[in-house]
Image (cartoon, coloured by chain):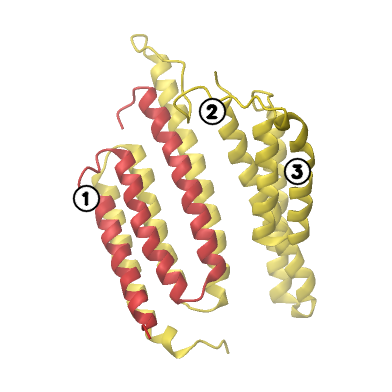
Chain colours: A yellow, B red
Amino acid sequence: MLYVPQEFISMYLPAIYAGLIIGFIGTMAIAMKREEIHILILTDIVGLAMIFVVSAVGTDLAEALILPGLVVELAETLAISEILITREMRKIEQDPRANLKRSSSLFPQAFSLDMEIMTTAPNFIALILIAYGIFLTGFTGGAVAGGGIVLYALSKKARGLPVLVLDGIAGVSGIAWCLWIIGFLLFFVTPQYWLLSLFLAACGLLLKVASKVGLIGLLMREDIDKE
Amino acid sequence: MIDVSLFFYFGIFLAIIGSIATAWGPGVNDPVVRTFNTEVASIGVCLVLLCYNHVLALLTLLATTVIISLILFRAIIRLEEMGADV
């Protein structure tokens, strides 16, 4: 039996009801809005309701379920925002009267990093960050290694995202899913190999998070390097 | 000694108020205001996770909230520059 503290049991019903109320508010607002970007923002609220319901469990299981939920929600938001931008671009390109302005950047003015340290240091620092992230494994290691990839991507001046890189990231992501699922399966089928399954899941999560954070860095670079 | 359940119910209150503000609050036709209002709800969820001792989930929630708001701001800015109706 799992041990659940007494106060967590008394907090179960309020948390479940709060999750239901928040989810209801979020889905009602989604039903009433028409614009896609507003719906994307409101999806965040429904994700918070999901966290409420899962965290009401109150054990380590809740923590283990919240982590992948948050990461998947992050990936969803990233993908849907890209799809929205692409669709709107296509809509405007097909309309001959619309004039597409070329400047689009996260920063209001041109953001150029012309420092000597940006060309020499990043290789070394990124290598150290990625090595330390692999040493840590798990979610924290993924975040550290992803930070290294972001630093490398932001400091290099090469433009455009080659198809090979995107395919590679997708492949690494698939391998990470497989490692994770095999780890979970081994954990339940043969509990005596728990250390092996733990490390399989941890390495899968490392690859997953690192590739995701690195992808966000590549997208940000596309915005920043635009003159 | 402050009771833990005070933080728990305050977190629930903040989350519900924040989600109502995100859905029907003042000025939410501007997507930037709507994105800021989600932060209120996520602070409430942070308090609830703190009461449950879910440290890793709390840290992950903080990190993903920051990254999601960056992604949303990027999408909003690019859609507004392209002249789409947001």
Mark before the other along the chain sequence, 2 or 3: 3
Question: How far across and how far down the image is residue B67, in percent?
Answer: 51, 47
Query: Contact (CB < 8 A) between labels 2 and 3?
Result: no
Callout 1 secondary element: helix
Q: Which amino acid does label 1 sit on?
A: Trp
Q: Toward the viewer: B53 or A90?
A: B53
Q: Horizontal placement of A212 versus B77: left or right?
A: right
* Residue underneath mark 1: B24
**Residue type highlighted by circle 3:** Ile
* Residue B86 at x, y percent in the picture: 31, 32
Q: Which image quadrant is residue A64 in?
A: bottom right
* Mark-to-mark CA distance, 2 and 3: 23 Å
What residue does disc 2 label?
A: A223
Q: Dot 1 falls on which chain?
A: B
Where in the figure is residue A164, as x and y percent of width and height? Answer: 72, 31
Q: Check disc 2 and report its element: helix, strand or loop.
A: helix
Q: Quadrant of the N terminus of chain A?
A: bottom right
- In the figure, A72 relative to B80: above or below? below
Q: Nearer the viewer, mark 2 or mark 3?
A: 3
Q: Which residue is drawn at 52% across and 72% down?
A: B54
Quarter occupied by the C terminus of chain A: top right
In space, the residues marked 1 and 3 are separated at their CA atoms by 46 Å
